[in-house]
Image: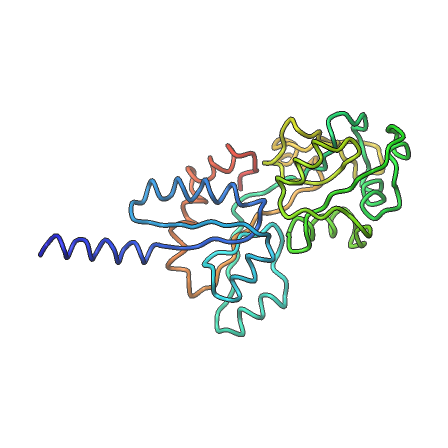
Amino acid sequence: MKKILLTTILSVASILTAQTITGSDTVLPLSQQEAEAYMKANKGAKVTVTGGGSGVGISALIDGTTDIAQSSRKIKFDEKKKVQDKGSTVKEVIIAFDALAVVVNPKNKVTNLTREQLEGIFTGKITNWKEVGGDDLKIVAYSRETSSGTYEFFKEEVLKKKDYMAGIQSMPATGTIVQSISQTPGAIGYIGLAYLDKKVKAIHVSYDEGKTFVEPSVKTAKDETYPIVRPLIYYYADKSESIVKPFIDYVLSPAGQKIVSDIGFITK
């Protein structure tokens, strides 16, 4: 009898601690590792993490199909209102920061680009690498799809809200951008710092019209010399606070922030 009762209690505890996280592909590897560590430290807890883009996560939060929306952009006013219309208030927690790296094929000899040149490339005004000091080679620009928070942040911060060029190569995930650029000599794209590896080359960016160029790194993001830095955010409905708070507290703890640092993001 005691064994049956204990099993029932454990089953109920497991249900109560089960939660879902959906959204940003940039935040995805961080949430996955945080979830694994959290579940090891808390037997019976279950955290399921999926990607799809910040917009997908926020839509799932609105629909009530996820407990936490992981996002690399701020929630929009109309999105927040949709949650409120369903009787909840949106809570926001910044869990880390990310430097957004502009990357090219490793064989590309261009190392430095100004914000204005990046704007020209991604809006279609600059179409050949020779226009920015490179070889006579067509530029192939890659972007995240429109549901991505990275797509929106890059448009707002780097393109100054100008539209991307028509026919830009839209990719469903950051990993596919890295893979495509590594195989395409004339390619350029943008990725979260945690995805940066030897398959691609990071561009040094200038926001002072070419006076200084800064490479993306944890160090330059922390000392605020690299200009393209953004918060990584968890959004949840206030009615879910009792479910999600233990996990979020873990992410913000020294153990959770060590994972942030180990992955290559910037701690709070």
**How far across and how far down the image is residue 98, in percent?**
61, 41
For residue 78, above or below residue 166: below
Q: Please state which of residues 87 and 179 is positioned toward the viewer in this rendering.
A: 179
Asked if residue 128 lies left or right of residue 8, the reply is: right
Q: Please state which of residues 173 and 16 is positioned toward the viewer in this rendering.
A: 173
Q: Please state which of residues 174 and 86 is positioned toward the viewer in this rendering.
A: 174
For residue 78, above or below residue 97: below
Asked if residue 176 lies left or right of residue 20, the reply is: right
For the view shown, which residue lies furthest in the front direction?
Answer: 183
Q: Residue at x 90, y 30 (%)?
A: 136
**How far across and how far down the image is residue 262, in percent?**
50, 32
Q: Residue at x 43, y 38 (%)?
A: 254
For the view shown, which residue lies furthest in the left direction?
Answer: 1
Quarter that holds the N terminus = bottom left
Q: Residue at x 58, y 70 (%)?
A: 81
**How far across and how far down the image is residue 86, in percent?**
50, 73
Q: Quadrant of residue 205?
A: top right
For residue 61, above or below residue 143: below
**How far across and how far down the image is residue 267, in percent?**
53, 39
Q: State how many labels appear.
A: 0
Q: Residue at x 48, y 65 (%)?
A: 64
Q: How is the image coloured?
A: rainbow
